[in-house]
Amino acid sequence: MMTRAINPALLLALGLAAANSSAAAAPSSPTLRFLEDRVESDPLDSAAQNRLTILYITQMRETGELAWLDRAAQSAHASLVAVAPAQNPSGLAALALVEFEFHHFREALALAQQSYAIDARSNGALATAGDAQLELGNYAEAQSIYEKLKADGSTPALRARLARLVELKGDNQQAIELLRQNVGVPGETEWHRIRLGEIYFRTGNLEKAAEQYEAAQKLNPESFLVREHLAELRGAQGKFDEAIALYQKVIACVPRAEFFQALGDVYSFVGKTIEAKRWYALAQDAYLKSVEQGNAHYYHHLAGFYSDTQDNPPEALRWARKDLEVRHSVYAHDSLAWALYRNGEFVRAVEEMKRALELGTQDAHLLFHAGMIFSRAGEVERGREFLRQALRLNPRYNSFHVHR
Amino acid sequence: MMRYKQPIAVSLLAIAPFLARASDHLEAPLVESDQGADIADVYTFLDPNDNSKVILAFDVHGFIVPGENGNLSGFDKDVLFRFNIENTGDAAPDEFIYVNFDPQASRSQPQTAHITIGANSFTAPTTVSSSTAANPPAPVVTTDAATGISFFAGVTDDPFFFDVPAFNRFVTSVLGGAPDVSLLSRGRDTFAGYNIQMIALSVPAAMLKGSAGNVIGVSATTLRGRNTHRSEDRAPFDAGDFVPIDRAGVPAINTALIPFAPKDEYNRATTLKALGTDDAHIGILAGVAVTHGDMLRLDTSKVNSGAQGGTNAGAGFPNGRRPADDVIDTILFLVTNGGLTTGDHVNANDVAFRDSFPFFAAPHQPLDTGVIDDDTRN
C-alpha cells in the first residue's frame, strides 16, 4: 500500500513495504470495523461517518500512517453530503479536525467556528478553533478559547493545550506542572508522558526526560512516538548505537521522512557521513513526494532540512516562506529567520527573529538561532546574551537533538 | 449530554489523545469529554406486570459496539449517578436516589453497586458483559428485601430508536422552504446494533410519591468529585464536593426538538417558528419540557400494560417514558402542528425489549465472521 509520503519503490528498497502495508489496509479495532460496515450499509448515516472520521484520525496518530487521514477526509465529506452543514455541526467539527491534521489551519478554523456557531454546546469544535488559532499564531485568541473551555471544567486534554500555550509563552515550569496533573489519571496514555518528557529534554534534564519516556513505554511498549523520543534521548546521552537501533525500529513501522532525517542526523553527529547522506537522500525524497501530493505537513521540516543538513539556503528560504503562508507561529517565524540567516540576509533575519521571540518562548533552539542571527547582524552583545540564555536554559543543548 | 450531540461527542471522547509529530507544532489531544458520565436517555414508567412499582432508568456511555462490550462494560467508579425525584408539584427535586460503583477488579467480575434512597441503602452486583460470547449474559437483578427495590446495572442494547440523518435531512428541507416528508421514509434506526451502559431500578411507587399525589417528576444527573487526588501509592481518585457533569430528563428537548438552538431553552421557539410550529403546539411542547422543569412526568394512576414495558395507549410519553414509546414520532407530530402522523418510520427498537424487569434488551453480541445483520451491520 502506498503511503502519502513515501514512494513505494523506495519502501521496497528499504524492505519496509510489508510493515507499512498494514496500517491503512485493515481496520484494527472492533469499533472501526463496525462503523465501516455501518456506513457501507448506510452511507447517509452521518453519525457513523462522523465517528469514523475521528477514529481514522486516531489511527493516523497511533500508527503515523498518513493514509488514514485521506479516509478521515472521505468520511467527513460523506457526512456533510448526507446531511447539510446547517443541520450537521458534528460533521463540520469532524471536517475541521481533518483540515487541522492536514495543516490547513485557516480552513480548520473556519469550519470549527461554523460548527460552534450552529451548536454552541460543541466543545470539540471550540477546541479545534483554539488549536487552529494557536497554529496560526493568534495566541490571544487561542488563550481566550481555552479559558472558555476551562469554564466547563479542566480536563487532561485542556491541560495539555494550556501547557503548550504557557510553554510557548516561556513558562516551561508551569507547562510541566500542568502536564504533571495528567500523570496517572484514568485512561492515561503515553502521550502526556511524552509531552512531559519532551519539556524536560528541551531544558536539559535528560534524567527526568528518561523517566517520563520510560513510563510512557510501559503504557504503550509499541508506540512509535515513544521510541522516536527515546531515540533522540539516547542520542543526547551519547548512546548512539541505541539511538540508531531505535530509529531503525521506528522506521520499520513508520517510514516517514522526518525519521529518515533524524537517523541521518545521528549518523552525521557521530561522523558517519556516508550513512548520513544515504538517509538524508531518503528523507528528501520522502519530503518532496509528500509535498508533491499536496500535503503541507513538511514545509517546516523542509526549511530546516535545507538549512541544516543540505546547505541549500535558497531552498530553505522557499520552504520557510511556504510554511509561513500556512501559519504564523513562533516556529514558522523562527524557521524563516534561520533560512534568511543562512542566505546571508542578516538584517531581515533579525526582523523575523524578533517576531519569533515576541511571545517570550524559552527554547534553547530558538535562542541559539537568535544568538547567531543577532551576532551576524552586528548586535554582537545581544547575540551573545541569547547564546548565554540558550545555555542557561539547556546546558546540554549541544548534545544530539532532533530538528522537529 | 444531549442526545443529538452524541454521535460526534461520544466518538471524540472515546479516543485517547495522541501526538503526531509531522512538524514542530503540537497536535493537541482530540477533545475528550466525560463518556462515563454522559447521559443518553431517561426512562420512567410503571411496571406493566405490577403497577405499584415504578421503573426508573437512565443510560450512559452510548455507542458501544458489540466487540467492545467487555472493554467498555465497567461503570466509572468516580461518577455518582443520581435519580432526581420531584413529588411536590414544582420544578425542584425533592428526593434523590444515588448509585455508585466500586472499581472494576477485572472484566470478568461484576462491580458492586451501592444504592441509596433516603435512609435505606443496599449493594448489588452488576451484570458482566462479554465481547466474545455468542450469547448475551442473563441480567442480574437484585431485590432489596427491606425496601422492595430491585436493581439492575449492565450493558444493554441502546433502547433509543430514531433515524437521525433522515430527521436532519427533513429539517433541512423544511428550513429550505420545501418540506420533503419522503426523506423520513428510510426507516433506519441510527442506534441499531449499539449497546449502552444502563442503570435501572424498580421502586415501589409509594416510596416516590409526595404531596403532588400521583404525579412524580423524574430526571437524572451524573456528578463527580470536584477535585482529583493523586499520590505516589494509589491510583488517582475524585473527592470533594460533587459537581454535576450531565443532566437529562425529557427527550423532546434534547433529541430533536431544537437540534441546535442556543442553550437558553426559551429560545427554542425561534427554531420551532422556523419549522412552522404554531403557538398552540409550542405551548404543548413547552408544557412538556419547561413548565415543571426538564423532568419526565409520570402519572402513576394511569394504568400501564402490555409487553416490552408497556404499550397501551395514553400511558406512555409524554406521560413518563417507556422503552417502546416512539418519542420522536410524538415530537414530529407536535412540531408539525399535528400534520405529520407518520413520524420517522422507525417505529420500534431494532430488538424487542424484555417483558419483565429490567425491560431493556440484552446487549448485542458480535456476530460470527461473515454473518451480517443488514439492520445493524453488527
Image (cartoon, rainbow, N blue to C red):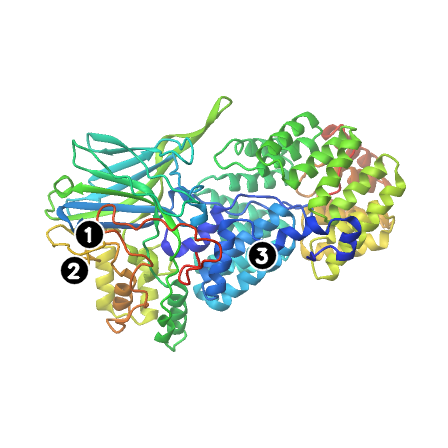
Task: Determine which residue is flagged by label 2.
Answer: B312
Residue type at mark 2 is: Asn
In the picture, measured across the screen, residue B299 lies left or right of residue B347, that is left
Q: Quadrant of the N terminus of chain A?
A: bottom right
Q: Is residue A189 above or below residue B342?
A: above
Whether marks 1 and 2 lie on the same chain = yes
Q: Mark 2 falls on what kind of element?
A: loop
Q: Chain of mark 2?
A: B
Q: CA distance from mark 1 to mark 2?
A: 17 Å
In the picture, measured across the screen, residue A317 lies left or right of residue B259, that is right
Whether marks 2 and 3 lie on the same chain = no
* Classed neighbour count for the residue bearing mark 3: other residues with Cα under 10 Å, few (<14), some (14–19), many (≥20): many
Task: Determine which residue is flagged by label 1.
Answer: B297
Mark 2 or mark 3: which is in front? 2
Label 2–label 3 contact, CB within 8 A: no
Which of the two labelled residues, at mark 1 and mark 2, occupies the earlier sequence position? 1
On the question of residue A366 being in view, the answer is no
* Classed neighbour count for the residue bearing mark 1: other residues with Cα under 10 Å, few (<14), some (14–19), many (≥20): many
Q: Chain of mark 3?
A: A
Q: Mark 1 falls on what kind of element?
A: strand
